[in-house]
Structures are given as structure tokens and as C-alpha cells.
Image: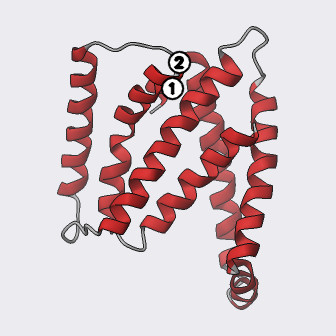
Amino acid sequence: YALVSMLAMMGAYLTNWALNYLNYTTRIVFKSCRVLPVMAFRTLLVGQRYSLSQYAAGSVLVVGIATFSMGDAEGTPNFSWAGIILISLALVCDAMTANMEERCFFRIRNAATHAEVMLYLSCFATVYSGAVLIISGEVWEAIPHSMRHTATVPMICTFSVMGYVTVCLILLIIKNFGATNAE
């Protein structure tokens, strides 16, 4: 649980950090490519083999999503090497997270319950995120900001609840259909 939670938190943190160097459209295009690293890590971690046609289908999906996302772009894509490296590391973390969730929690003899996985992952993520906020000093900026702009607090809470619901749904998809189909 500790390792999977760390990978999930790092994937989110690296994705948000990459936004300092990439515009949102570029972030979406890169994140839409997640299916290919998930397939690659599924081969390494779970032993699942994919045919050339399955990789081709994944590639077509990525190209389609990227084309759709670029068509809606307000500006030109922003490519910074720092951003590309950060978002690529985030994709690796995301791919490892999904596959390790499947392998460690759901594809074992005494599979974990959905509630158990959510509880432990959330507990570890809370500790890790809190540590990062304190060590980076961001918490000392966030508290006064939230006190000055109280309207942001309900938005943050809503965002957190929606994130929790999203993770619940993704875990259910991973449990029932596998990591590749979830991504």
C-alpha cells in the first residue's frame, strides 16, 4: 500500500509540477498517451502479452485523443524539456500505479476489498502529501491564501470529493477489467 500510494501521489504531483512548463493542452495530450505505458508495464509487472494489433489499436487511440485535444487548443502547444521530462515521469508513475494496484490488490488469492484499498491508499497519500506540503513550504502559503479567499475552500473540498469518486471508479474498473482497460 505504501509503495502504490507513493507512486499515485508522485504521478499527480509530477503532473501538476509539469504545468509550470507545459500548457494544459500539452498536458492532456501527454496524459492521453497513458495507455501505452500501462500496456508496457503490464507486460513487465503482470506478465500480460499484447499483440502488435493491440499496440496498434492503443496507438490509434492515442493519436485520436491527441488530435481531438489539439483541435480544441486555444494556443499553440508549449514544449519545454523540463515539462516533457516531468510529464513523462508522471506517466511512468501512473502506469506502474495501475498495474501494481491490479497485481498486488486484486489478482491475488485473498484479494483486497475495494474499501480496504481505498482506505489504505488514502491514509498513506494523506501522510505523503502532508509531508510534501510541509517540506516544500507550500502549506504556509496555502493557509493564509485560504483564509483570505474563503470561496476557494469549498471548491477544494468539492475537487477532493470528485477526485475520491474518480479513484473509486478507476479501482473498480481495474478490479473488474484490468489496468489497461482502466486507462
Please, is residue 2 above or below residue 74 in the view? above
| Mark 1 closeness class: few <14, some 14–19, many ≥20 residues within 10 Å | many
| Mark 2 closeness class: few <14, some 14–19, many ≥20 residues within 10 Å | some
Looking at the image, which residue sits at the far top? 109
- Please, what is the three-letter code of the amino acid marked with disc 1? Ala
- Helix, strand or loop for disc 2: loop
Which residue carries the number 2 mark? 46
Q: Are marks 2 and 1 in contact (CB under 8 Å)?
A: yes
Please, is residue 121 above or below residue 177 in the view? below
Residue 87, percent from left and from top: 41, 56
Q: In this orientation, which residue lies closer to the viewer: 163 or 77? A: 77
Q: Residue at x 18, y 69 (%)?
A: 76
Residue 85, percent from left and from top: 37, 59
Residue 151, percent from left and from top: 67, 80
- Helix, strand or loop for disc 1: helix
Report the side of 76 relative to 129 (left or right): left
Looking at the image, which residue sits at the far front? 44
- Please, what is the three-letter code of the amino acid marked with disc 2? Val
Residue 179 - label: 1
Check the image and tell me how it is coloured: secondary structure
Q: In this orientation, which residue lies closer to the viewer: 114 or 84? A: 84
Q: In this orientation, which residue lies closer to the viewer: 101 or 113? A: 101
Q: Residue at x 20, y 56 (%)?
A: 70
Q: CA distance from mark 2 to mark 1?
A: 10 Å
The C terminus is located in which quarter?
top left
